[in-house]
Amino acid sequence: MNKKLLTILSVSMFVTGCATTYQANEVEPAGFLGAYHMLKEGGNDQALMVYHHPDVNKLCKNYNKVLLEPITIWVKAESSVVDVSAEDRQYLKNYLYQSVKKSLGSDYQLVTQPGAGVMRIRGAITEAEGSMIALDALTSIHPGTVAMSGIKQMALGSGSFVGETAVEFSIEDSITRKPLMMGVDKRAGGKNWVKKFNSWGKVEASYDYWADKLKTRLAECRAGKLAM
């Protein structure tokens, strides 16, 4: 076995075994945002596609309240959401909403009406696929199958039999509806044992990750330090 392949195998085994979720290599816009011409490829530690208003670091200081709209499901013909039951769709919408609400609640007053100092946050789940619990668990035990899953994850952005999900979001002025930030992102489950025995566990972990990242980004923005 050549040195390059050995390196790939060792890295994939380490990476796949340690992270709860990973960013996918690419994501297909679903139509929720519409203004995709405004987005660009995200940089390091950003969503796969992003938009920032040119003056966002100044504008963020004007907001101390959040109007969080209910999360929606945005279905296109080839989306994995097509096969998700109505009950599970509602569960996923509620989970993401509550995760974002909890994350932002310590930094912002949550309101139900537009107004001065209020930013509106809209979000949509555009892809969602649960893990195949038994096969995911089996392929997380043997070093060979973990390594193969890691290679698949590096090549395609998703490991073997893991859950994955994609979202689109917009942060806007609640009155003018002028966008401050927009993003499109996709994540897939890793091979570690966190939330392993819940088919939606790694999807939930992705939602928690995004909620926490949103809190961090808004804090950076209010401090005038959001990376553009």
Image: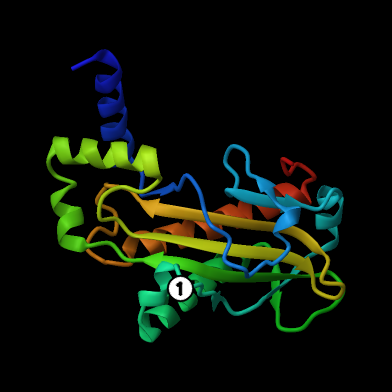
The total number of labels drawn is 1
Give the residue type that dot 1 points to: Tyr
| Residue 102: percent from left, percent from top | 55, 68
> Looking at the picture, does residue 81 appear above or below residue 24?
below
Residue lying farthest to the front in this orientation: 77
In the image, 196 versus 124, the foreground residue is 124
Q: Is residue 203 left or right of residue 223?
A: left
Check the picture and name the quadrant holding the C terminus.
top right
Q: Position of residue 59 (x, y in %)?
A: 85, 56
Spot occupied by residue 100 in the image (x, y as percentages of width and height)? 56, 67
Compared across the picture, whether 171 is left or right of 7 comes to: right
Q: Residue at x 66, y 71 (%)?
A: 122
- Place residue 78 in its image quadrant: bottom left
Q: Which residue is drawn at the image coordinates 30% and 18% (left, top)?
A: 4
Residue at the top extreme, as displayed: 3
Q: Which of the colour schemes (rainbow, by chain, secondary structure, one colour) is used?
A: rainbow
The answer to whether 109 is drawn above or below residue 56 in the figure is: below
In the image, 216: left or right of 114?
left
For label 1, count other residues whose C-alpha is less than 10 Å away and answer few (under 14), some (14-19) or many (20+): some
In the picture of the structure, the residue carrying the numbered disc 1 is 95
Q: Position of residue 157 (x, y in %)?
A: 40, 45
Q: Quadrant of the N terminus?
A: top left
Residue 153 occupies quadrant: top left
Residue located at (58% from left, 60% from top): 29
The residue sitting at 40% across, 59% down in the picture is: 205
Q: Secondary structure at mark 1?
A: helix
